[in-house]
Image (cartoon, helix red, strand yellow):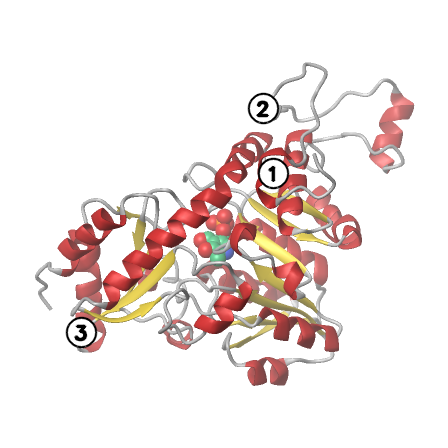
Amino acid sequence: MTDQPSFDTLAVRAGIERSQFGEHSEALFLTSSFVFENAAQAAARFSGSDGGNVYSRFTNPTVQTFCDRLAALEGAPAGIATSSGMAAIMAVVLSLTRAGDHMVSATGVFGATMQLFNMFGRYGVETTYVPLTDLDAWRAAMRPNTRLLYVESPSNPLTEIGDIRALAKLANEFGAMLVVDNCFCTPALQRPLELGAHIIVHSATKYIDGQGRVLGGAVLGSESYVKDGLIPVLRTAGPTLSAFNAWVLLKGLETLSIRMERQSANALEVARWLAAQPQVSKVHYPGLPSHPQHALAMSQQKTGGAIVSFEVKGQGDAAQRARAWATIDGCRLLSITGNLGDTKTTITHPATTTHGRLTPDARRAAGIGEGLVRLAVGLESPADICADLARGLAMPIEV
Ligand SMILES: Cc1ncc(COP(=O)(O)O)c(C=O)c1O
């Protein structure tokens, strides 16, 4: 490799350490534990004075290759891999907080993320929710015991954009950490550490796998945070990524950049088409100039990404839900599923699925109405995706 290999080169080559067999593809180390030459070496490995592999809950070469490659792509010094995106977020909160601490999170985050933060309330870690785009509200919510600020940008499912540079500055002012869930963009489109963020979390289940096969997650940050904050959580609590899943995710990283580019282009075409449909009242897509934070989005990320949400027309909640469900049910090509980031386009009704566990008030505060439909645009032809949506939008409804 050259001294400073490009993103595309790192995506296929970073982190590889060949075994004695000289394999070309990354080796898959399916082993729970590792053997030692003698008791003294075992003791040294367990104490950490010898840095070799010990037990796959916290050391595995395939998982390490995945961490190293993703860290290289994010421009991060280090990282850990976890069993899911939620496990990654849990590891961050466990590593940064203790009873009596406080966090500030955007209101518009994945439903389970909000549930998790609320669960931490039971253990004395309180969360204040503020609108992602209201910087004054973020400032007003800060307290001396605020340890972390949490954002998704773009957010799930409304694709709101957080001003990562401004939020990082605010975090620095208060000695807190800005944590960015970079799941919707991935490092192929956005590198939050370069914008000043301190920690990145990923649901690798989404675009990093990219083909809907496995669950996984990751946290990336400074060497010292990973070593002293995250690895003790991984070693003790065990929210670990399996070696097999790490291997699958490594294969996902190899094609990440070209998938993100093509899926973004497809999403832009679908978003433009949706904006012209009479049954649609609003399209949420950061790549459209009509998005309220289009300029900010384009200053932080390469494209608008591949998530497009839209609102269907209807008088009142019942009519909107009926129209949204009819649209979804009328599609024959798109997959009705909660996952996103797949090469196959997925369609979701957030209010009754991914965000269904939130209270109606929390859903309202997050702007998730009954008429909202989320698309994660894949690699099918945009013309076929639009034809399928046209079929759904034309479905008759009974209210
Ligand atoms: C933005 C975002 N973050 C985190 C998660 C959680 O990831 P996982 O399902 O891998 O636990 C999701 C899942 O949909 C998500 O959309």
Note whether residue 373 is visible. Answer: yes
Quadrant, the C terminus: bottom left
Quarter assignment of residue 381: top left
User: Which element type, helix, strand or loop, lies under badge 3?
Assistant: loop
- Decide which of tag 2 and tag 1 comes sooner along the chain: 1
Q: Is residue 284 left or right of residue 194?
A: left
Q: Which residue is mark 1?
A: 9
Q: Position of residue 241 (x, y in %)?
A: 59, 39
Horizontal and vertical percent for residue 76? 69, 51
Amino acid type, residue under disc 2 in the picture = Ser
Residue that mark 3 sits on: 314
Q: Nearer the viewer, residue 301 or 246?
A: 301
Q: Amino acid at mark 1?
A: Thr
Whole-angstrom CA distance, mark 1 to mark 3, is: 49 Å
User: Viewed as shown, does residue 82 lie left or right of 306?
Assistant: right
Ligand 1 has an atom within 8 Å of the beta carbon of the residue at disc 2: no
Q: What is the distance, in whole Å, between disc 2 and disc 1 at their CAs?
A: 15 Å
Q: Residues within 10 Å of mark 3 (few under 14, many from 20)?
A: some
Identify the residue shown where x is 89% and y is 36%. Answer: 49
